[in-house]
Amino acid sequence: MTKSEELFARAQKTIPGGVNSPVRAFKAVGGTPRFITKADGPYIWDADGHRYIDYIQSWGPMVLGHNNEKIRNAVITASYEGLSFGAPTEAEIHMAEKVSQLVPSMEMVRMVNSGTEATMSAIRLARGYTSRNKILKFEGCYHGHADSLLVKAGSGALTLGVPSSPGVPDDFAKHTITVEFNNLESVKQAFAECPDDISCIIVEPVAGNMNCIPPVEGFLEGLREVCDEYGAVLIFDEVMTGFRVSRGGAQERFGVTPDLTCLGKVIGGGMPVGCFGGKAKIITHIAPTGPIYQAGTLSGNPVAMAAGLAALNQLEEPDLYTSIFSNTQALAEGLTKLAHKHGIPMTYNVAGSMFGIFFTEAEKVTNYQQAISCNNEQFKAFYHGMLEAGVYLAPAIFEAGFVSKAHTAEIIDATLAAADKVFADVAHL
Ligand code: PMP
């Protein structure tokens, strides 16, 4: 029995499924999740002492790679002054100023503790601000686990929400309209049917929770126009894309300005942090300046602020993004070429430092239905082959991959060399 197997068996006795977030349990790929002991740069190590090149990067935030020295030192220094005060600090002002500087549409910012809190709060704000109940989201986009957002589409272009989890009352879900990502017509149809009821559109501007699916040309621009026409709030959930697909997020990369933006993990540099913000005329409607309630004991935590600021300051290095982006492109393109060499159908998407490979005959994947039709058996075999070869990919076909500053050209080459051998085995399935 490996140490990970032993720990997994023990964990399941006191933690549901042995994990504190479901995707970690390897349900989609089978086998035993690796219990991690440490991480550094592009690598993580498991409890059995195996080292892996890590393309999960804590599900996105480690743009600089793991265990960044400046972030670590900032956390140590801040911790000497106390761990939590429940009162305002100057570090929170620095953080809000830094976020506003890097993402100018975020004129004002409220800190929270997770991406889920950020999207949940932004939606409450949009509903309160517009005095409308419905929200519009996209099939395959994930915005955390708040009730209104755990809703999937049924058949047809416009589906009034059906909860995708027990525990979400139908009465909540019915306010969530789910339409197809990258399909502007379905958005227009929804608004035509409910012109005065939809408070906001919430979108991952590059979808990272159905593998990696960038917006098609005109999609984000179209969402902006629809929101302007109907007086709805446009919310970009940049929990994954913020500081990843460009220093200023997807809104900078695609030149479309939302009314509200949600950020998450990245601004904590690895600590539990999120925030939402946007136009001052909207965000001042939250308490204490406005009537819409939102709060948090640990929000703006001093240690988390120190970590986040140390992370964001380093993202201003010139050329940082150019080299991460070219390494990401080299990885996704390289994997796809190797798959083709071994006769395995594959295509890929890249958006900045996010990437996705798809085991499919399709030339391009642009929506959820295509993403879920990929060959899961080939993916699973590839996944376990890569894990054995020392490469740690996300354990599900629906997750984007992440490249950091620490993934140098040599690390990409080592990954491709491993993949060449694994694809040869997958081809014989
Ligand atoms: N939005 C997006 C786009 C996400 O990818 C996630 C989590 N992966 C969330 C929101 C929720 O963030 P958290 O897990 O920090 O609550």
Image: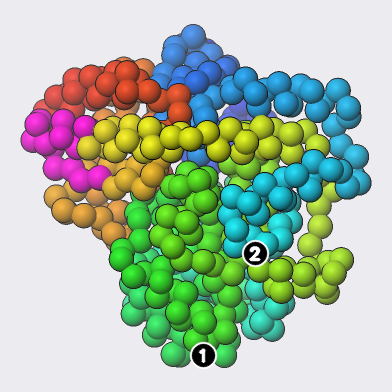
Identified at 32% across, 18% down, the residue is 410
In this rendering, would 83 be left or right of 171? right
Q: Is residue 109 above or below residue 26?
A: below
Q: Which quadrant of the view contains residue 179?
A: bottom left
Q: Nearer the viewer, mark 1 or mark 2?
A: 2
As drawn, the residue found furthest toward the front would be 318
Where residue 184 appears, x then y in whole percent? 36, 75
Q: Is residue 394 above or below residue 236?
A: above
Amino acid at circle 1: Pro
Where residue 43 appears, x then y in whole percent? 46, 19
Query: Can residue 362 be found in the magenta stretch?
Result: no
Q: Is residue 289 visible?
A: yes
CB under 8 Å between callouts 1 and 2? no
In this rendering, would 359 be left or right of 126? left
Identified at 34% across, 67% down, the residue is 182
Q: Which residues are magenta?
A: 334-348
Whether the residue under disc 2 has CB within 8 Å of ligand 1: no
Label 2 crowding class (10 Å Cα cut-off): few <14, some 14-19, many 20+? many
Instruction: Return the mark for residue 195.
Output: 1
Query: Can residue 347 be found in the magenta stretch?
Result: yes
Identified at 45% across, 79% down, the residue is 225
Disc 1/disc 2 C-alpha distance (Å): 24 Å
Where residue 398 appears, x then y in whole percent? 38, 47
Instruction: Return the mark for residue 278.
Output: 2
In this rendering, would 214 be left or right of 2? left
Amino acid at circle 2: Gly
Question: Of callouts 1 and 2, which one flags the residue occurring earlier in the amino acid sequence?
Answer: 1
Label 1 crowding class (10 Å Cα cut-off): few <14, some 14-19, many 20+? some
Identified at 81% across, 52% down, the residue is 296
In this rendering, would 252 be left or right of 390? right
